[in-house]
Amino acid sequence: MSRARVTAVAVLCLVAVGLAGLAAKGLSESVVYYRTPSEIVAGQARVHHDLRVAGTVVPGSVHQAGTETRLRLTDGTADIEVVHRGGLPGMFGEGRGAVVEGLLGADGILHAERVIANHDNEYRPAADR
């Protein structure tokens, strides 16, 4: 192989490795893992980092004031306080499943940017419910 060809192949390899490294770094920074309220209470979630929490909305815990909603989310063992500004999905309700995405504050409150109503993925006729 000629010297020019070897140089071109080496440059292409370096560019490919660089692009692969950037892609891997971008993917690792955008991954958000599900946590449970018990894990958050136990200190297993990092403060001021993106967080996704799945649980059930504690009945009687939803309080709205203007565009702000405060609620508690539980996994049956522990519960956390959540604050959300903005609209809530139509299927959202007390005693129902929800997935909340946001940042955990140093005060232990999850400041939600997004609330997703979790729904049953099994269809049953109304008589069976």
Image (cartoon, helix red, strand yellow):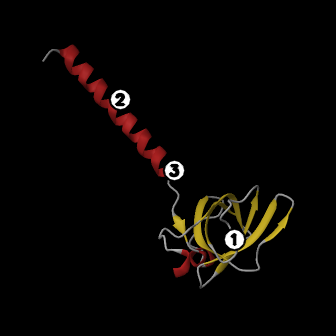
Residue 53 got which mark?
Answer: none
Name the residue that disc number 1 marks. Answer: 93
Of circles 2 and 1, which is in front? Answer: 1
Q: Earlier in the sequence, mark 2 or mark 1?
A: 2
Name the residue that disc number 2 marks. Answer: 15
Q: Earlier in the sequence, mark 2 or mark 3?
A: 2
Q: Quadrant of the N terminus?
A: top left
Residue at the spot 59% in from the left edge and 85% down from the top edge? 77
Residue at the spot 59% in from the left edge and 61% down from the top edge? 51
| Secondary element at tag 2 | helix
Asked if the residue under mark 1 is in contact with the one under mark 2, i.e. CB atoms within 8 Å, the reply is: no
Instruction: Classify mark 1: residues with Cα within 10 Å, few (<14), some (14-19) or many (20+).
Output: some
Q: Using the image, determine if residue 118 lies above or below residue 37.
A: above
Name the residue that disc number 3 marks. Answer: 29
Please state which amino acid type lies under the numbered disc 2.
Val
In the picture as drawn, the residue positioned furthest to the left comes out as: 1
Q: Report if residue 115 is visible in the image.
A: yes
Residue 85 position within the rendered picture, expressed as x and y whole percent measured from the top left: 77, 57
Q: Quadrant of residue 93?
A: bottom right
In the picture as drawn, the residue positioned furthest to the right comes out as: 66
Residue 114 position within the rendered picture, expressed as x and y whole percent measured from the top left: 66, 57
Please state which amino acid type lies under the numbered disc 1.
Gly
Given residues 87 and 31, the one toward you in this image is: 87
Instruction: Classify mark 2: residues with Cα within 10 Å, few (<14), some (14-19) or many (20+).
Output: few
Q: Earlier in the sequence, mark 1 or mark 3?
A: 3
Residue 106 position within the rendered picture, expressed as x and y whole percent measured from the top left: 71, 67
User: Disc 2 versus disc 3: distance between alpha carbons?
Assistant: 21 Å
Residue 6 position within the rendered picture, expressed as x and y whole percent measured from the top left: 20, 21
